[in-house]
Image (cartoon, rainbow, N blue to C red):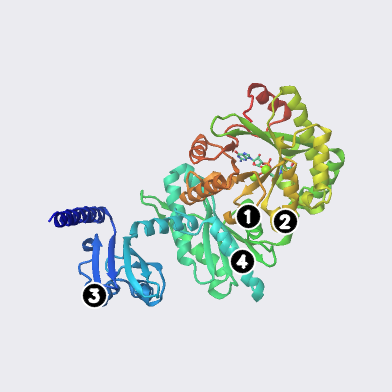
Amino acid sequence: MNELHYQLDLLKAMNDKLMEKEKMYTRIFEVTESAFLYQSFVSDQIATLGQWNRFFDFKVREPRNFNKILDLVEDAYVPELKRVLFLEKQGETSAQTDCQLKATKGWLQFRTFVIYDNDGQPVNKVVYILNVTKARIQNEELNYMAYYDSLTGLYNRNYFVRLLTEYIKTAKENNAVVSVMLLDIDDFRKVNDGLGIMVGDELVQQFGFFLKELCGDNMVACHLHSDTFCLALYDPSGPGSVDAVYREIQRRVGEPFHISSGQDITVTVSAGVAEYPEAAQSALELMNCAELVVFKCKKQGKNVLQYFAPPILENFLNSIELENKLKRAVFNNDFHMYYQPQYYAGNRRLRGVEALIRWKDEEKMISPATFIPVAEKNGSIITIGKWVVEESIRQYSAWRRQFGFPFIMSINISALQYKREDFVDSIVGILNRYAVRPAEVELEITESVLIDDFSAVYEKLKVLRSYGIRISLDDFGTGFSSLSYLKRLPIDTLKIDKSFIDTVMTDSATRVITESIINMVKSLGFESIAEGVEEEQQYQYLHAIGCDVIQGFLFNKPLSPQELELVLAKSPPAV
Ligand code: C2E
Ligand code: MG
Ligand code: MG
């Protein structure tokens, strides 16, 4: 009798435990936001759990009821969903797929898990169903922002460069032509200043919409910035020819744009065209050439279309006899170094300075952006570059002793300098001569250095870093910057180009990209520097998204040595 009691107690205890477990699972399924389908192949049982009734208005009692689920989704997703729902037929253990629903256009994700016995027979299966509509929409928005300009709906600059590069690649294979047309609304400033930014924005938007409509199979358009647009035409001819497209643009801008605040605005547009393969070989070069032409159009009265011809560039260079003057300047040493401070975003304390060359030609300053490319072309960059390195390090060594604290001296190095056999030795030699610690010197390289000859430069960078010299990747975002190749680079710092900073407050796509660059840089353990920060608002934003260092006119322009000394005297840095 006692034995029977004991057995009964035991059964009751086991039953209570099971009931408790059941309660637990029921409760869990109540609070979950997903639906579940359980099928036992052993007992032939099928159960629906979780939020099944909120997802579906039918029950599934036997395997053929599964087809009711298939009826709900768009046709394109049926074959894959069928495979996932009946996964045991494939002998697989898990799979998942996202499907769009016919009725609501929402998205469901189906994840199936099957357990098999030792003989490979299915024992049971769970299908886990989630509503992923929100995530899909967010993802689509994010994708949209990475590729498109939010104001006009046209492609953004980065994506356009990619598409143009594709056009050029195909044209190379097929001996075809690619035309790049840069468009700039004449006197846009007057609209902006006179009628307000909102009106200016709406004009840009309407013109952008028009260009979008204009694009056909072999034509893509992007909004570069402000009132500047760029078109790429693959093998243009007939109604898709450059002239026909420009005529169409002329026709549109000849009619007024009706602005919602009541104004009617008529504008003219200047266009510069550069063509592959004649003008240049790469997307960025073509865009630069087209820009140079627009620049010329503007000087010659606007409202015109002009083609790039090599003389445009040559005239430009010859007009100031740049090459010869440059040679003389190297000989006479007419160069000066200026230094632009960089500050930590967090405490606004000095991190270091970037050494920037200045050329005073008969009391006129010539910008390095103009003469460095020429010096690279005629080879004098080697002589100039050597002088830059030596002068910056000499100056740093003197300041280091005078002020008694370290900071970083960042020096721009051009691609040709890296190619020299003796490059590493000469840098190390100069550091030794002036007793400067390698860790206090940073070399700035651009992506073009890497594109030319990745493996040779890669090895040199590694050697430089093994001495403790810092390496910084300059102008990031202007080339074919791919975030994925960053992982392979032996660098310490990444400088986000000014073109990003210029539009970061006005263009949401730029913000998305800038934030993902900074996150990537952080995860790789590099330091990030924002270049060309001119406004407090930009600084605040960059600081908030985790950018480490700020360089720009907001804090200082490039300063003469005397001017920098005033800064050093009052701001012990935080290295
Ligand atoms: P970079 O290395 O990207 O240098 C930054 C440029 O942005 C500098 O122009 C600087 O004056 C400018 N900048 C910085 N903050 C602001 C800002 O807030 N607003 C604006 N509008 N501009 C800002 P810079 O000195 O004219 O130099 C132009 C380029 O020439 C440099 O771009 C660099 O690529 C090259 N360069 C300059 N010095 C040297 C040099 O010694 N050697 C070599 N190889 N290249 C140099
Ligand atoms: Mg630089
Ligand atoms: Mg830069």
Q: Quadrant of the C terminus?
A: top right
Residues packed near mark 3 inside 10 Å, few (<14), some (14 to 19) or many (20 plus):
few
Disc 1 residue: CB within 8 Å of ligand 3: no
Q: Which residue is mark 3?
A: 62
Query: Residue placed at 48% from the left, 50% from the top?
Result: 512
Three-letter code, disc 2? Leu
| x and y, in percent, of residue 209 in the image | 44, 60
Q: Residues within 10 Å of mark 4 (few under 14, many from 20)?
A: many
Q: Is residue 58 left or right of residue 398?
A: left
Label number found at residue 557:
none
- Asked which quadrant contains residue 10, the reply is bottom left
- Secondary structure of the residue carrying tag 4 is strand
Name the disc covering residue 479, or none: 1
Residue carrying label 2: 313
Question: Does residue 566 lie above or below 151 as drawn?
Answer: above
Kind of element beneath mark 3: loop
If you read the primary sequence from the N terminus, does the residue marked by circle 2 or circle 3 appear first?
3
Between disc 1 and disc 4, whose residue precedes? 4
- Relative to 166, 123 lies left or right: left
The numbered mark at residue 179 is 4
Q: CA distance from mark 3 to mark 4?
A: 62 Å
Left or right for 390, reference 158: right
Q: Specify which label sits upstream in the sequence, 2 or 1.
A: 2
Question: Between 433 and 306, which is closer to the camera in this rendering?
Answer: 433
Query: Disc 2 versus disc 1: distance between alpha carbons?
Result: 21 Å
How many numbered discs, if any?
4
Contact between labelled residues 4 and 3, with CB atoms less than 8 Å apart: no
